[in-house]
Image: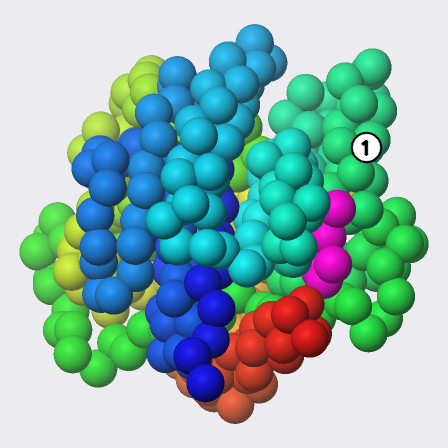
Amino acid sequence: MKKPAVLIIVENLPVPLDRRVWQEACALRDAGYEVIVICPQMRGFTLAEERLEGIQIYRHWISEEAGGFFGFLREYASALWGESKLAWKAWRRHRVRLIHLCNPPDLLFLVAWPFKLFGVRVIYDVHDVWPEMFEAKFGKRRLFYWIIRVAERLTYACADVVMATNESVQRIAHTRGRKKPDRVFVVRTAPKISGVNYQPDPALKRKRKFLVGYVGVMGDADGVNYLIDAAAHLVHKLGRKDIQFLLMGTGPQYSRLTAHRDRLQLQDFVELPGRVSNEFLFTALRTIDLGVACDPINPYNNHCTMNKVLEFMAFAKPQVMFDLKEGRVSAGDAAAYVTENSPVRLACTISELLDNPAARERMGRLGEERLRTELNWERSVDQLLKAYQTALG
């Protein structure tokens, strides 16, 4: 029997750039669902409508990729308008039976709730804990923090089933979200990447002995400034002229971070190429000697499973990270942990690990094995399909 049409709505990244959402969409397609995705026009993905690998994609205009408070208001307002129009278009064309909401923000219930009047089911896919994200960005629990808590609660109320990225988010779904255990499924983010087909490119090291890599978003909560400051300490204070840094990705803080690098006179040591192709990314991940996840310690990041952590593990690379709860759950013994938000401590840990090739080899091997045996995407697909069966059942 043919499975129904399902609609995935994601606001903060386009597909297929959002790797988690794209992997979910492909897994659902392979399971026989008709999959439609609504996402923003941004980061080079600007076609308003296309069909890609059997998945129908609709993209809407947004005002900007915001970095400040009022920018977020403009971005979310324009996104909600575009998502609402496209959701009705998708419902008319495809007779959608289920809407899959990917946060942030926790405002997409405004798009989905009217469709519940027509029997459409709703899944809430919690990528980030939005109230903690807001607090990490803006520092204080002001009025808008509590408005966001209300929005989070209404999104949980709208959802028939919740998908959590890890056990920390699962506990929040049970407590703040008031969801019963049989309605919450842990669908971990896990990269479906094989590094076998990619060879190292020594030219990326710029004739230096070591290459240290970062990949991910460059926003307020991602801590790339800590890594640039750590590079400055290594180069200017410790005299480490043998380390090249490759920081891949973009985001609302990209221009500021580039200017910060230049002020610290690190142009020859720190490359910031912006958004890169998959081929460049995977070649770089094969080349680096060490990965860094520099997301600082705070309540928001403690709840997050970071894609970059898992991508380093997929390529058998050791890594250094700040000591985050879910970071330890993901990486285990495949990482070295910095226990305070200190660029100096981060720099020293990077230096120590680069000078210990045996430890790097062991950590990389453990990470690859852990990802293959315990955190692989196939396990996540099983939970994804169970969540859909429960919601539609």
The vertical placement of 386 against 130, above or below, is: below
Q: Residue at x 11, y 62 (%)?
A: 202
Type of amino acid at the residue the image marks with label 1: Arg
The residue sitting at the left extreme is 203
Q: Which residue is drawn at 21% across and 82% down?
A: 196
Disc 1 crowd rating (10 Å Cα; few below 14, some 14-19, many 20+) is: some
Magenta residues (range):
158-162
Judging from the image, the colouring scheme is rainbow
Q: Is residue 324 left or right of residue 60?
A: right
Q: Where the C terminus falls, by quadrant?
A: bottom right
Magenta region includes residue 4? no
Residue closest to the eye, 194 or 96: 96
How far from the left and from the top, in percent, is residue 45? 23, 39
Residue closest to the eye, 192 or 151: 151
Res. 248 visible in picture = yes
Q: In this view, does 313 lie to the left or right of 58?
A: right
Q: Which residue is drawn at 66% across and 62% down?
A: 163
The vertical placement of 145 against 242, above or below, is: above
Magenta region includes residue 159? yes
How far from the left and from the top, in percent, is residue 272? 26, 36
- Residue ID for mark 1: 149
Q: Where the N terminus falls, by quadrant?
A: bottom left
How far from the left and from the top, in percent, is residue 121? 65, 57
Q: Residue at x 64, y 70 (%)?
A: 392
Q: Is residue 47 left or right of residue 319?
A: left
Q: SS class of the residue under badge 1?
A: helix
Query: Number of marks in the image?
Result: 1
How far from the left and from the top, in percent, is residue 367? 49, 78
Res. 366 visible in picture = no
